Structure formats: C-alpha cells, structure tokens
Image: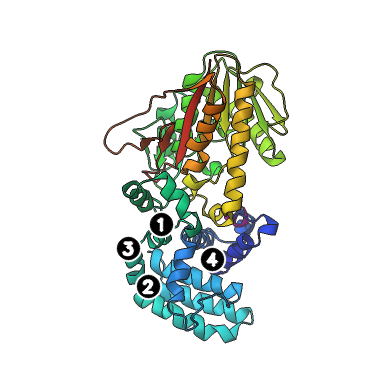
Amino acid sequence: MRGIEGALHVLEQVRDQRGGGFASEALRKIGDDMTPGDLTLASSLVYAVLRRQEMWRAVYSRFLRDAQGDAGLPPLIRDCLSVGTAGLLELRHFAGGVLVNGLLDHLKAKGQKKWVSLVNAVLHNVGEKGAERVEALRRSPSPEERALWAGIPVWSLPAWTRTWQRPDLNRLFDLMPQPPLSALRPAPGKREELLKTLAEHGIKAEPSPLSEAVHLEGTVLPAEVPGFDRGLATVQTEGSILVAAQAARLYKAGLILDLCSGRGVKGGQILQMCPEARLEGWELSEGRHKSAWREMKRLGVESRAKLRQGNALELEPAEPPSLVVLDAPCSGSGTWTRKPDSKWRLDWERLDRLSAAQRGLLERAVALCAPRGIILYITCSLLRQENENVVAEALAAHPECTELPLSWGSGTGSPFHRGRPWGTYIWPETPWLDGFYCAAIMKK
C-alpha cells in the first residue's frame, strides 16, 4: 500500500466510528503492508488533515462552483480534497505535483474518473491561492476564523470564550497548530543514563528545564526507545509527567487510589517516585486494564499495585485511601494537537455528559478519601466546564473540603496559569507539553 492510498484508507476508518477507528490504531494495522517511507507519508498526511480538518474544507470549498460547498460530494472526494489541500499547504518535503497525481490515480483506480477533473481543478487553485487564504484566517479578528486556523471545532468556541479572555484565547489558538514531539520520562535518577543510551543509538535528545523529562526532536513509538523494555524510559507527554509528579509529592503514607487508572502510565510513575507507596487502580475498560498490568510489570512495581477492572462508582477500596488521584475522562481539548481525531467526535451533548461524569467521579473521590486525605483532580482539558466548574461544585457541596495550593515552576514563558479561581492549567507552550488542569482538594 502506498502512502497516499494509506492516508485515504485511514481517513475512511476514522470517519466510520462504528468500527472505533482512531487514526493511530488504523495506521498500526496497515503498517506491516507499507514501507517505512510510505507509512511516514501516510501518517503525515492523516495528521495534517485531522489537526485542522474544518479549515482545509473551508479553504478548498472556496474553489468549488457549488454555493453549498462540499456537502453534496461523496466522502472519498472530500477526503481526496482534504488530503490534497493539507498536503499542498502544510507538508514541506513532498512534491505537490506528485501528491495531486497520486490522488487522481487513486480516483481512477476506484472507478471515480468523473471526479478527476474537479479534484484536479480545485487542487490547482489551492496550490496557487490556498496559502493566502490560510494566512487571512490566521490574521483574522473573527474568533470563528481564528478557531478554524487553530484547528478548534467551531461548535466548541463558546466553551473556549467562557474559559479564556480574548488575549489568552488568541495565544492558545497560536499554540494549537504546532506539531507535537515526543517526551520521555526516565526512571528516577536515570536521566543521564537515558541521555547516554539515546546518544549511543544516534537519537538526539535534550533534558527539559521544567521536569525530569527528556525532549526528542521527533515522535517515537514506545518499542523504538532504547531501554523501554527494561523500564529505563517511558513515552509520556510532559504535562502528564508534571501532574503525576504532583501526586507523588502529595503522598505521605497509606493507600493511593487511582480512580481512573487508564493504561497505568501515571500510576506507574507515582509508584516509581514513591518507593514505599501502595496503589490500587480502577479501570472500566478491559483493554486499558490489561495494558496497566503490563505497564506495572515493565516498570517492576507490580508487587505494590493492585489493579481492578470495574466501575469506579461501584468498587470499594481495600482501605480508605490517603490520596485519591482522579484523572477524569474528558474532552481531551488539551491534547487535540496530539490526538486530533477525538475532537471531531465531540458535540455539546457529549461534552455535557462528560461534565456530569466528572462531577459524579469527584463526588465519589471525596466520599472515599480518608479524613485528612487529599484528592488530586486532573483532566487533559483546557475548558472551564470540565475544570473549575466541577471543582467549585464539589467544594460547595463539601464544606469539610478546601483547595490545597500546589507549587509549580514560574518565570518567563511559564506554561502554568492559575485557574479562576481554583486549580492550575498547564498550557501547551512547547511541542512536548499537552494542555492539562490540576487541582488538589484536602479533606479536613
């Protein structure tokens, strides 16, 4: 399978949500049938499209004769136009003529010759005039057009304007389109060893000034990292590393309850940083639960971890936990650059359901936490609806609880921003950082 064909196949899988097709999963499935070069091209095209899907459609639609835009076009034609537009305007190391010819050849092979002239004409105009339109969107005073440029779903704009004032919002929108890069979390005390190991394998890396993380110049899969199999390094975004480190600093004694443990990445970090700690992790998904067990074994901390699959609203811990870590399911708006397909599956109804689930889980965390214990509420969202509003409701309902100040770094270019008035946001200021929110609640 060639790169252009692979990109179109993946976009079809992502669009067919019944199959649960996320881009990363679809790319893994076709990886064995592609050369490394074609897989890289397919991945680059797919993520270029998904990060700013609405903008590409807005750009190419200006060159369609139909006043209704692309609404009447078959899905394959829309995908071809999106891939062509994103590739022509964003990829810097791939010949535009080769890309367009590849798309046209694919249409012919699929028996869609009647669309070849339209796709060719539209992409010709995109190549000549598209960059000018993108720049106009970037400079536009219109929030809607700025959202298009940033890759923010336009329907979600009211949630962003309720959270951030215009100067902050413009700055966040400027940050959103930057391509993400991989960060590595070394085992405690092993950063120099990791840097040396990476250098020996010809991998360029630099220590982070914000945390113990190591910054890579590109993206990498876990199995490609030297020392991954023996727990020397973990592929983890720096925002995730920072919030898990807060949990480790808050721990004093007793049981840690990881209320939504996911694949165990943060839980494993906490146990590595707290050699005396015991952790009980709950996860609803069977797949993530199994992944968490593998993670604990890889890091060598499985003897101090008790992982259970089930509903966090129904399970009971072995003992009242002194620290509850709630990494709540959320919109993922802080990670939309890294995981762009997730944002196109959201709408207001889904966002409201997530907010309700967050409130229920935080209420459960407060109920389970031992007296004088701490709840650390975490999301990878940058929206007030999922953050300060949820914390505010919990504090109002529980006068025995109070917010606990957290210590973060500061200085010029700091990614840490105080919530209004509770918690702290981590902005995606660098390609290694995703957006996060974190608030600590102490139960008196």
Q: Amino acid at mark 2?
A: Gly
Give the Cα separation between the discs numbered 3 and 4: 34 Å
Residue receiving disc 2: 130
Foreground label between 4 and 1? 1
- Mark 4, Cα crowd under 10 Å, few <14 / some 14-19 / many 20+, is many
Q: Is residue 139 above or below residue 121?
A: above
Residue at position x 56%, y 83% in the image: 115
Q: Amino acid at mark 1?
A: Ala
Q: Nearer the viewer, residue 141 or 412?
A: 141
Residue 406's image quarter?
A: top left
Local secondary structure at mark 2: helix
Give the Cα separation between the discs numbered 2 and 1: 16 Å
Q: Is residue 1 visible?
A: no
Dot label at residue 140 = 3
Dot label at residue 150 = 1
Residue receiving disc 4: 3
